[in-house]
Image: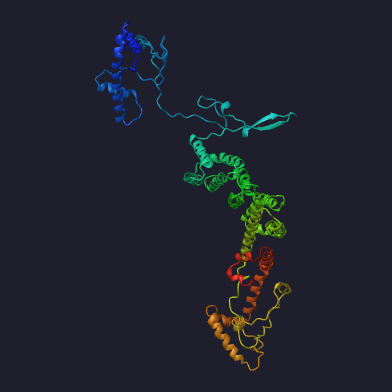
Amino acid sequence: MSIVPKETIEVIAQSIGIPNLSPDVALALAPDVEYRLREIIQEAIKCMRHSKRTVLTTDDMDSALNLRNIEPIYGFASGDPLKFKRAIGHKDLFYLDDREVDFKEVIDAPLPKAPLDTAVVTHWLAIEGVQPAIPENPPIEAIVAPQDGKKMDHGKDDLPVDLKLPIKHVLSRELQLYFDKIGELILLRPETALFKEALLSLAKDSGLHPLVPYFSYFIADEVSRNLSNLSILFALMRVLKSLLSNPHIHIEPYLHQMMPSIITCLVAKRVGEQVSDNHWAIRDFAAKLVASICRRYGHVYHNLQSRLTKTLIHAFLDPSKALTQHYGAIRGLSALGPSVVRLLILPNLETYMQLLEPEMQLEKQKNELKRKEACRVYGSLLLAAGSCLYDRLRLFPGLLSPPDRQPWKTNKKIALTHLPKNKRKASSTLNSHQPPTKKLAVDPTGANSQFPSTDGPATSSSSGSNPNHHHSHNSSNNNSSNAGNTTNTNTNINNATGGGVHAQRVSGSAVLRQAWKEDMDAGHLLSSLHSLFGEGIFSFIQPAEMHCFI
């Protein structure tokens, strides 16, 4: 059976002047018409493929008719859509409403205006600040808008009130698709390689600034919704880190919207759906992110770090908060630097440890989860205090270091050397800070061997000891250990002036006095931390300095 109904054949016959076509003839012609149509369409498809196109056009149909030696269809092209009308008495039969045009009407119609040539015309935009009212310029009413997006309204007391009107923010279609794709990757596929490529795009692309307010609102909204989903929280924080690292984005105006989301991940009471979830990692990540923001934008917002530390220290010192919140506050404060730890954590460390120690003991805390959380907090405190101690020792590397030279050893009694008469006496302030005097052998390879006493040669308290023997021994040691540091010229000058020893001792005492004037001495800090943490604090001391305390 043909797909061309016999009614179509009858309508075509009527359009060419055959009003009474037999139904049997129409039924016989329908298969032949279908065959001819298929043949023409197949030829038109071949022409389309040879033209490297995927859309069939009327030109392809004309080419197929020419290949079959059939007269092509004449007509004109129109940009307007075709208007079909339903045939009366037929539900599925439509025809084109093609009005017959008389040639006489076309000839008698007036000719259209000829298109103008392309030209450049100049006109005044404004004359002395006033826009002239000419057709080339838009009307003034069309360009005047409310100033600063505000509208004046009157309240209950008939006082003028500024109302901010919403500003329409138009995004391109490409940016909308980009934002939707990033949101889909965050929520549905945060562990895929495509998401990692998206993070690189967020960190490097230069055309993403219009999306920053949308991302800040999206991150804030999703963090509040997905506190029980660690994978989504990690993805949101990584997106935020990529945006912060993009050098082409001016992100400072949106920091006040992003900081609450980061602090929520840092000091939230519970993060994750299950107890066994590794929520400690997201807190550590958020702490590093907060510290990077303070380092990068602290000079722009002078109260950024002060407000942040106030929030974190409140969470740290509040005993009603959970241990997980204490952990996040400690990690956040320690990430801000050793100075913050020294000023905010260490003064409260002893009091806090009195509250923390019962939580780590099996006899007083039966809940295993609470004990593990307390151990985590203890570890974060040890890390913060140890980092502060390491920083103090790094500032004064010679404070706890071993002596550069070995003391002079002899089988005889201690050798004494008369000091110069012009040597300055030690101050009472310096003596109060120095440790008790110990009996040590005098090092003859130091300054005293190069600068002999003005009162006479060195004397020994042992009977029968030869001073010349000591002098020759000192000279040999001095030449072997300090050959690269002293010269004959310097020795002569220092012997002539007599002030080399004095200047060296004054500079050394000044350095020590400056170190002792610091807020916290490294030795005192170590002793206090050792009483709280035990030998675990020794892991933050360099091996060369640890010999002073072991």
* Foreground of the two, 273 or 168: 273
Q: Residue at x 53, y 48 (%)?
A: 245
Q: Is residue 371 above or below residue 464?
A: above
Residue 250 visible, this angle: no
Query: Which quarter of the image is occupied by the C terminus?
Result: bottom right
Q: Residue at x 62, y 61 (%)?
A: 387
> Dividing the picture into quarters, in which one does residue 535 lie?
bottom right
> Dividing the picture into quarters, in which one does residue 82 lie?
top left
The percent coordinates of residue 216 (x first, y second) are 58, 41
User: Is 461 left or right of 4, judged from the image as shown?
Assistant: right
Furthest residue to the top? 20
Furthest residue to the left? 69
The percent coordinates of residue 3 (x first, y second) are 34, 18
The percent coordinates of residue 490 (x first, y second) are 56, 80
Q: Residue at x 71, y 60 (%)?
A: 350
The percent coordinates of residue 87 (x first, y second) are 41, 11
Q: Is residue 61 above or below residue 386?
A: above
Query: Which quarter of the image is occupied by the N terminus?
Result: top left
Furthest residue to the bottom? 464
